């Protein structure tokens, strides 16, 4: 039984209020009374930090409750009632949402602090932080919503903010197109989410449409309806979390400022799809076919993104494809019903991916916004703090023991192996080796060897403390977060147990050790190949054959453009040129032409002479007299 508390709504409210306040300050400020940048930055950090403090309060409140009763709720107000659908603006805090709250607010706060330094000198400094606060507030609404409708409010909120922030540098048309692409692709996924909610309400929503009511009544679903709902909801997840076939927006999202990339990839937006599947674990756990589809889509996405990441030359796009790949691992975990393993990888990934993106931002900042790794090199001695922290993040991403990514990734691979999903496990091990390769290819090329651009190298220097301190804090998380769920202890899994409906694998000690050893071997092989080819730097390679194909991302964007975008634009152009003028606008234009004809006909009587008007009056009065006399007779 959940316990009602009245402070849950404050968690998203703090950054949302910050967004409104900072936005108004930005709008009404002028050159004469313009606030200093640091004031905007400090105001922007207050909301996320207060939300983190409140998340800690929620954690300790839940921890004090009995394990089976770890639910806190708050009904802010009745939103709407239509027929059997009664929706409250309500919030639910349980172990799953609490874990998400903790790392979203912590990492969001660190990214806001980092942004104070990174965005210095930007002409729209206030607008940037207003959008960032709105982004974080929307994600907190998504996480805390007590049902799918409230979740959808935050779901759409992060979609809107991603558009605003990806296209933030709107002077460049390519950035605007990247924002449009993210917005449109996400709307395609969201349509599936809406249909899934509609089917779910049609089947069992009359008993209550919050998570706890749906969980209590899920047994009323027929297998066919349950499978349909699972797959439709997963369509929404593929949009938000960039899975096949809707992954194409995420690499282009690198057009936004680097702190935005860190926030999207580590703490908001892309983790929403995994969270949604885990939140509906009571449904997915009973539909094995849906779980299998989720797992295979996830692991194939991981493989595809890893192939692309091996050939990218933009430091942010290397990390972007690594995010798509790691999201694939997460979906593989929740797909094999290892929901706690999937969420644990969301948790650890947040630390090392935020660290790597902010580290990449530190490099870009030092090199005056250069992002091509083949124009870098030798930065190890120039930027020691950035180098050390990025190496820690790279080791965690690549799955090196005892860093955090090793434990969470290994748990997913073990779960796949122990549940008999051998193909998913095998592809996962292959992707682990590829991840180690492209991650350390980036590290070696950027920091080792000789500088490729001597002028940029000579002017490079370590970033200020406001940027390096968040890197150090995140590096600590990248090192130690994995120990929260080591085999035998599994603190995170036990914490999440009341929120999740999962089948714990029983593969035995041999399967666990075998999964661990193969993962370590894959990591060692990947990093060995990367060191052999790029350990001492080296020139930019020349691609041939398959390498060109992979460098151009298998021309998927071009395929989508030819199959979907251009035909859609052609249809729109035909409607604009043919249907609109000849069908939609025809009645309006016809009436206007009729008035013009009538006006032209009566114009001949308007000659402008008084004597003519007098004749009109005499003729008119005569006709009226004749009419009246005839009427009287």
Image: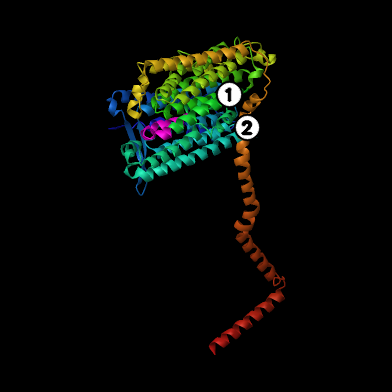
Circle 2: is it few (<14), some (14-19), or many (20+) Cα within 10 Å?
Answer: few
Q: Which mark, residue 334? A: none
- Residue at position x 66%, y 68% from top? 598
Q: Position of residue 577 (x, y in %)?
A: 66, 52
Q: What main secondary structure does the magenta stretch of the protein show?
A: helix
Say whether disc 1 or disc 2 marks the residue closer to the N-terminus.
1
Q: Is residue 508 visible?
A: yes
Q: Is residue 49 visible?
A: no
Q: Position of residue 511 (x, y in %)?
A: 40, 18
Query: Where does the magenta region start and end?
Result: 271-291
- Residue at position x 48%, y 39% from top? 190
* Residue 289 forms part of the magenta stretch: yes
Q: Nearer the viewer, residue 487 or 403?
A: 487
* Residue 363 forms part of the magenta stretch: no
Quadrant location, the N terminus: top left
Quadrant location, the C terminus: bottom right
Residue under pointer 1: 309
Residue under pointer 2: 555
């Amino acid at each position: 039984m959940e316990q009602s508390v009245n402070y849950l709504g404050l968690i998203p409210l703090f950054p949302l209020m910050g967004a409104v306040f900072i936005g108004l300050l930005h709008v009404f400020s002028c050159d004469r009374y313009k606030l200093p940048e640091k004031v905007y930055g400090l105001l922007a950090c207050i909301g996320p930090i207060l939300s983190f403090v409140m998340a800690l309060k929620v954690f300790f409140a839940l921890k004090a409750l009995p394990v089976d009763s770890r639910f806190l709720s708050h009904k802010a107000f009745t939103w709407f009632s239509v027929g059997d659908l009664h929706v409250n603006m309500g919030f639910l805090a349980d172990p799953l949402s609490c874990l998400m709250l903790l790392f979203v607010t912590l990492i969001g706060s660190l990214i806001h602090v980092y942004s104070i330094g990174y965005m210095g000198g930007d002409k729209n400094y206030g607008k940037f932080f207003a959008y960032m606060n709105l982004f974080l507030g929307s994600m907190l609404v998504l996480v805390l919503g007590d049902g799918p409708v409230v979740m959808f409010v935050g779901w759409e909120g992060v979609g809107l903010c991603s558009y605003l922030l990806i296209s933030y540098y709107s002077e460049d048309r390519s950035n605007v197109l990247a924002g449009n692409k993210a917005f449109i692709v996400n709307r395609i996924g969201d349509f599936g989410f809406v249909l899934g909610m509609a089917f779910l309400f049609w089947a069992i929503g009359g008993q209550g449409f919050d998570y706890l009511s749906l969980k209590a009544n899920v047994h009323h679903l027929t297998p066919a309806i349950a499978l349909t709902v699972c797959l439709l909801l997963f369509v929404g997840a593929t949009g938000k979390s960039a899975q096949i076939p809707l992954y194409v927006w995420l690499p282009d999202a690198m057009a936004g400022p680097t702190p935005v990339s860190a926030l999207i990839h580590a703490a908001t937006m892309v983790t929403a799809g995994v969270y949604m599947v885990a939140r509906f674990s009571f449904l997915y756990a009973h539909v094995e076919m849906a779980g299998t589809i989720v797992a295979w889509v996830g692991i194939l996405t991981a493989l595809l993104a890893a192939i692309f990441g091996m050939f990218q030359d933009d430091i942010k796009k290397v990390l972007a494809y690594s995010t798509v790949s790691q999201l694939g691992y997460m979906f593989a975990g929740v797909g094999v019903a290892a929901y706690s393993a999937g969420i644990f990888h969301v948790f650890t990934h947040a630390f090392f991916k935020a660290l790597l993106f902010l580290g990449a931002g530190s490099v870009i900042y030092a090199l005056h916004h250069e992002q091509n790794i083949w124009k870098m090199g030798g930065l190890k001695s120039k930027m020691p703090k950035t180098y050390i922290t990025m190496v820690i993040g790279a080791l965690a991403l690549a799955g090196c023991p005892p860093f955090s990514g090793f434990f969470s990734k290994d748990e997913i691979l073990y779960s796949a192996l122990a549940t008999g999903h051998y193909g998913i496990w095998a592809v996962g091990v292959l992707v682990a080796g590829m991840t180690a390769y492209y991650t350390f290819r980036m590290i070696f090329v950027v920091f080792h060897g000789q500088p490729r651009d001597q002028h940029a190298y000579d002017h490079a220097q370590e970033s200020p403390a406001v940027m390096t301190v968040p890197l150090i804090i995140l590096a600590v998380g990248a090192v130690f977060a994995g120990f929260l769920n080591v085999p035998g202890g599994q603190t995170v899994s036990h914490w999440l147990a009341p929120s999740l409906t999962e089948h714990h694998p029983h593969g035995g000690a041999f399967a666990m050790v075998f999964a661990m050893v193969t993962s370590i071997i894959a990591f060692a092989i990947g990093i060995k190949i990367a060191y052999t080819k790029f350990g001492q730097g080296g020139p930019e390679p020349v691609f041939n054959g398959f390498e060109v194909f992979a460098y151009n991302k298998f021309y998927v964007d071009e395929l989508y453009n030819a199959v979907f975008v251009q035909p859609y634009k052609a249809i729109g152009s035909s409607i604009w040129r043919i249907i609109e003028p000849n069908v939609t606008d025809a009645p309006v234009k016809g009436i206007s032409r009729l008035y013009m004809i009538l006006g032209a006909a009566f114009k001949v009587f308007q000659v402008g002479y008084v004597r003519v008007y007098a004749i009109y009056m005499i003729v008119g009065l005569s006709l009226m007299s004749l009419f009246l006399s005839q009427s009287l007779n």
